[in-house]
Amino acid sequence: MATKNTSKRFAPKLHIRKGDKVMVISGDYKGRTGEVIEVIPSKNRAVVEGVNIVKKHIKATQNESGGIVEMPASIHISNLSLVDPKSGEPTRINYDVDNNGVKVRISKKSGNVIK
């Protein structure tokens, strides 16, 4: 059986960063918003607070008790859209260079800078 080559030549360019406010645009959690906790560029996935909650079974150790813990699982980046800081609606982003020569993200809907 042949193995699949999963290595990528270039790292993917992601429009979402840790700490961003995002909205789910497709899937079971469509319409929900949350803050990005973690971004996984190698898999094109992100973990969003309050979205895609799964139950994980934890084995008891000497220090901690076991049980069933609810935690957010990752969701594919293509199912997320950045939230416009002015209107609160999902928006696409544009990149521009400000007066100080720093590359910034700009909302396509309102034209505001996204921090």
Image (cartoon, rainbow, N blue to C red):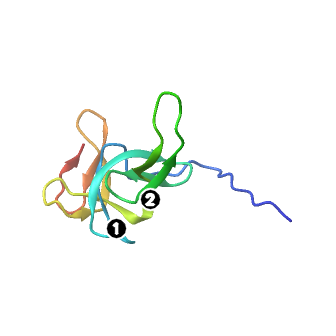
Q: Secondary structure at mark 1?
A: loop
Q: Mark 1: few, some, or many residues within 10 Å (few <14, many ≥20)?
A: some
Give above or below for 102 relative to 32: above
Disc 2 residue type (three-letter): Ile
Identify the residue at the far right of this view. 1
Work out whether mark 1 precedes mark 2 in sequence or the reverse, and give the earlier one. 1
Q: How many marks?
A: 2
- Give the percent coordinates (x, y) of residue 99: 22, 36
User: In this rendering, would 76 be left or right of 28?
Assistant: right
Q: Are marks 1 and 2 in contact (CB under 8 Å)?
A: yes
- Give the percent coordinates (x, y) of residue 83: 24, 57
User: In this rendering, would 112 be left or right of 41?
Assistant: left
**Residue 29 circle label:** 1
Spatial separation of the CA atoms under disc 1 and disc 2:
10 Å
Mark 2 = which residue?
75
Identify the residue at the far left of this view. 86
Residue found at x 30% / y 35% = 101
Give above or below for 62 relative to 34: above
Give above or below for 30 relative to 96: below
- Give the percent coordinates (x, y) of residue 106: 25, 52
Residue found at x 26% / y 59% = 33
Q: Mark 2: few, some, or many residues within 10 Å (few <14, many ≥20)?
A: many
- Give the percent coordinates (x, y) of residue 63: 48, 27
Disc 1 residue type (three-letter): Tyr
Q: Secondary structure at mark 2?
A: strand
Residue found at x 44% / y 55% = 55
Q: Where, quadrant-wise, is the C terminus in this rendering? A: top left
**Residue 50 circle label:** none
Identify the residue at the far top of this view. 63
